[in-house]
Image (tube, rainbow, N blue to C red):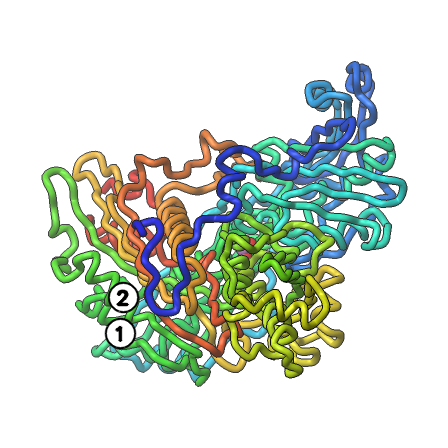
Amino acid sequence: MSDAAPRPKDNQGQPAPRLEGRLKVTGEARYGSDMPVSNPAFAFLVTSPIAKGTISAIDLGDAKNVPGVLDIFTHENTADLKILSYSKGGGGPSTSIQNLGPKIQHDGQIVAMVVADTFEAAREAAYKVKIAYEAETPSASFDAKGASESPVKSKLPQAGDAAKAFDDAEIKFEAEYGTPTQHHNPIELFTTTAVWNNDELTVYEPSQFMYGLKNQTAKRVGIKPDQVHAVSHFVGGAFGSKAQQTPRTGLVAFAAKKLNRAVKLVATRDQGFTIATYRAETRHRIRIGAGKDGKIKSFQHEGWEVTSRPDDYSVAGVEDSARLYGYGAVKTAVTMVHADRNTPGFMRSPPVVPYIYALESAMDELAAKLDMDPIELRRINDSMKDATGKQWSSRSLMECYDQAAARFGWAKRNRQPGSMRDGDWLIGWGCASAMYPTHIGAAAARVQFSADGQAKVQVAAHEIGTGVMTVVGQMAAERLGIPLEHVRVELGDSAFPPVPVAGGSNQTASCCSVVMKACDAIIAKLNGSTTGHAQTVGSAASPGLGEKFARLGVSTLEEYAEFVPPEAEPNKVAGLFTGPIKKLYEGTPTLVGGSKGEKLMYALGAEFVEVRVHAETREIRVPRIVGAFAAGRIMNTRTAHSQYMGAMIWGVSSALHEATEIDPRNARYVNDNLADYLVPVNADIQEVDVILVPERDNFVNPAGVKGIGELGNVGTAAAVANAVYHATGIRVRELPIRLEKLLT
Ligand code: MOS
């Protein structure tokens, strides 16, 4: 046991090391573009230097003369590629802008792809492709001339008469907040390798959803899903950027078919900024009406989010901000602002990162206005039901605050801004809540168990770094009563039974729930039970295991199981009339949970940050962060600790470092590289302390797992902003907080 592998407390699993850890650190793990294929040709993309306009002419003469060039694909010879209709769900295309022209709808749109015998030849030729454009003036973002607004149409939370309650309140608080464009930048680039064997296509691509990749690729190139085999054994980071189908996949598959040769594409870092998705900039207006005692009578949250011209992508995190506390009345609204941009998409904790930043900044401001400790303000408004009357399945928010505050030493804080100082450094202490909806989806799994006590689990899940391979193995080992070393877990292949997209932090809950079911069915067979339920779990591998198999006359039992959460049953989900398992096989996951069901299901946490702001230079440092989190059953304290630690570091990054700058004149990204797109390095991050608060919740799903992949970076930015205020007395309401914003 160590800081990185905490001793398990109640309802927490052993800190087993990652099953794939050795493969990763020794370089043996094969990522999509590492997969060996015979005689590959290499592709290089050409992307648009304008954000809006039309291609008027293409001259491929010089490019085709580069030795080794096999073919060049443009809008003139790719009309057979099908255009898929956009849908925001996890399995759909990332954008409706899939054409290579002639219409240009965003900076960096793919306009051509060169394929050559070598990467170098493809790259050289790509720079010799001459494309003429008729450019128009684009709208870059908020406030741009020509940007258009449309309301989010889904039903957003409303309760009581929030406007009147605000007018009547003793204390009124109102403020606006903003968050910038951010890009995921996983270390592994966006790659696709396509190999045809007659009419059968194999796609190697880092993916968060094997069945989405399989089905969408089939549609794009006009073949049946059965003809596509998608493989994604390891993913070098994704964070939402590899959840949806991007236009490149179909293009590479199309080229491979035409050339009758394997084609491999590894897009460049800067291309990744425009050929995939990103976190869109948001704006918020929050109004809170409260009593002098701090009790909130009215909460109003309006959001604005940038999206592309054609696609209605929004995250609408008012769905969550409107539930966090027991407000009296609630009014929410979200507006999309359409600009000449690539379509944004999921990025770690998509709805809650921006919306809870705004809410938790506002809570700190309200506490200051009330001259109240900010933890006390949360305690006063802590409630087991929301303003609409819906009950929480479990809620350990204040327990998280209490444990984190004790570890942090919050009691020693002087509330007065600017009152704590160490030489030239102004010290600020801030805190904020974290929340993430608990999602679960229909899933399937196959488990084999042999008389020698060895098991094999197959699920088309995705090891994007979360530790899912290990925790699925732990669940199988527990239910079958065998050591983890006897379980082999196979993931990342569309030949295995489908599980939902590795998004919305559902994967551990969904995979563990279905793997439990398959294992329990095996134990029931071994125990001669016909009920389909395990009589005794954990006893199968007793010395009698061989006899139990012998009695059944077999040496191996195999179970295929399907799990459907009750609220995902047909007819319970709008528009879903066939079974969710059938939908899943067709590439559409059905995720339920959060605020949508019978009860509010959320994981919660509290984060505390110390900042030091230099009195003269205004340099901002974060010497320590403490986070306490409660998320139901924790399968593995090591992987959980790692998820929370990484997420809080990202939260600091989001507060102080990250922003994709866009040139308002031409709607182009300026800092589309890892030198200019700032992320924290080791020197920026010092102490990160994670507390795993025990919690049990048997309502959320059979595994009792709430999901933690996205919880930890929610609230961090607000905690940093609140600490900066405490240090300096300056309230920064627009992220990132950089030193120029603290020069007075
Ligand atoms: Mo995560 S952004 O829901 O893939």
Disc 2 marks a residue whose amino acid type is Tyr
Q: Residue 311, how many percent across, how many down?
A: 66, 55
Circle nearer the viewer, 1 or 2: 2
Spatial CA span between label 1 and label 2: 9 Å
Q: Residue at x 78, y 19 (%)?
A: 63
Residue toward you, 189 or 199? 199
Left or right: residue 387 compared with residue 500: left
Q: Is residue 46 visible?
A: yes
Asked if the residue at label 1 sits under 8 Å from ligand 1, the reply is no
Q: Residue at x 63, y 52 (%)?
A: 491
Q: Which residue is mark 1?
A: 379
Q: Residue 461, how many percent across, how many down?
A: 62, 55
Residue 652 vs 358, above or below: the answer is above
Residue toward you, 469 or 553? 553
Disc 1 marks a residue whose amino acid type is Arg
Q: Mark 1 vs mark 2: which is more N-terminal?
A: 1
Quadrant of the image containing the C terminus? top left
Asked if the residue at label 2 sits under 8 Å from ligand 1, the reply is no
Residue 357: quarter of image: bottom left
For the residues bearing labels 1 and 2, Cβ distance under 8 angstroms: yes
Q: Which residue is mark 2?
A: 401
Left or right: residue 534 compared with residue 695: right
Residue 508 vs 552, above or below: the answer is above
Q: Is residue 662 visible?
A: no
Residue toward you, 459 or 440? 459
SS for callout 2: helix
Q: Residue at x 61, y 48 (%)?
A: 242
